[in-house]
Image (tube, rainbow, N blue to C red):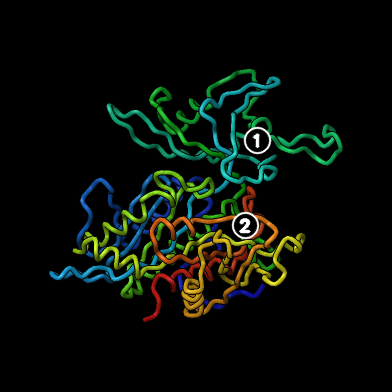
Amino acid sequence: MVPMPFSDSNASATGLCKFVDVSPSPFHVCRTVSVQLEEVGFVRVEETAAWPTEAGRYYLIRGGSLVAWSTESSPRDSAGSTPGRFRIVGGHTDSPNLRVKQNPDLESAGWQMVGLEPYGGAWLNSWLDRDLGISGRLSVRDGNGLREVLVKVDEPILRVPQLAIHLSEDRKGVTLDPQRHVNAIWGLGNSPRSFLEYVAEREGVDPSAVLGWELMTHDLAPSAVVGVENELVSAPRLDNQATCYAGTQALIAAVENPTNATPVLALFDHEEVGSMSDRGAFSDLLSTVLERIVLGRGGGREEFLQAMAGSICASGDMAHATHPNYPDRHESAHRIELGGGPVLKVNQNLRYATDSAGAGAFALACDQAGVPLQRYVHRADLPCGSTIGPITASRTGVSTVDVGAPQLAMHSARELMGASDVAAYAAALAAFLAPAR
């Protein structure tokens, strides 16, 4: 693992750790990103309001998804000059975890329990015997309307205990049943209380005013730069908050180095469960925003279609590094190293959207950023995961390339990546958003 010599953005391993620790849910990711964007002049717009016509830096939030862009480099005149093309970095804000059921209060064998269910492809064994907090949002009655309240309880109130080895049939552990074995203990049954009432009271909300909720658990162990030479990042939710962080830093760097392309950051919720929601990559969110950008700058439908035809998206998600204890699970001719730089992901069956043109565009960005590029291919005899890449490509018609940063322990409650890869990833994405003229 050789440290990278470059620094084309303010991205760093310690910055990523801070980002992850304050962003336990997709809703918190959006808030964290919005705070960083507003510090450099981005202004929030509402989808229900008139679209800005002046050149500037803007973002919007739809639930746990965020889209940000800058039109500072797109001229507008009486002839209807519009953004000639978009350069998009996409990612997702959600991560596999254990989420709170709608009627969470349970009792079993004298214990007070909270009913949980897996979200996405959570590696269930990794969630056992961890101190867990709660995050998410509440929908609260406010007069005749509703308001949103973010929830973040960074205290060890929940725990899913492992079965003692002496009680397993063969002392090799048990196969976890997601219905029965991942409910959390949060107290003895001596004084039963409502879990939702507890959460509401913690956030200063009248429990009777809570009409809806999206609550999830998160590991309370803080993110850390680790290793004998501090060359690793140990953290939860690296898939895919590493992309959210690197993409944000890349956009901030790109708007300070404008080109004739309009840079866009699109972070979607619900990737881990298929993206089929009002704010997932299958929704109209990205297409709607891009069309309104063109309309706001004086163009019409024809100019929008021209812009889309000339645009390209880098779908950013994490990539599998070669595991030292399981090297046989990887394609032997495509070794991926932590600290080896960003990863180009290719799958002939289009689980990744990369084609040769997209591969060339990202390779060029890495070259311009001065970072090495690794190329990943999944074993042909193992099922390959997917990303927002194929979805974005098919929904928008925009040429899309799948990229990422290498990591170990994907979908575990705790994951591992190279410290130097954080800046390398952000630098490559920044060069992609603002390619050299």
Looking at the rendered structure, the kind of residue marked 1 is Pro
* Mark earlier in primary sequence (1, 2): 1
Secondary structure, mark 2, is loop
Whether residue 7 is visible to the viewer of this picture, yes or no, is no
Report x, y in % for residue 402: 51, 64
Report x, y in % for residue 379: 68, 62
Is 160 above or below relative to 242? above
Report x, y in % for residue 89: 43, 63
On the rendered image, what quadrant is the C terminus found in? bottom left
Residue placed most toward the observer, 348 or 196: 348
Query: Which corner quadrant of the image does residue 170 belong to?
Result: top right
Question: What residue do we see at 66% from left, 59% from top?
Answer: 408
Secondary structure, mark 1, is loop
Q: Which residue is mark 1?
A: 178
Task: Using a 10 Å C-alpha cutoff, classify the residue at mark 2 as few (fewer than 14 neighbours), some (14 to 19) or many (20 or more).
Answer: some
Q: CA distance from mark 1 to mark 2?
A: 23 Å
Which disc number belongs to residue 420? none
Looking at the rendered structure, the kind of residue marked 2 is Cys
Q: Mark 1 or mark 2: which is in front?
A: 2
Report x, y in % for residue 182: 65, 34
Is 433 above or below relative to 201? below
Q: Is residue 76 left or right of residue 264?
A: left
Residue placed most toward the observer, 394 or 138: 394
Is 29 above or below relative to 389? above
Task: Name the residue furthest front.
Answer: 349
Q: Which residue is mark 2?
A: 384
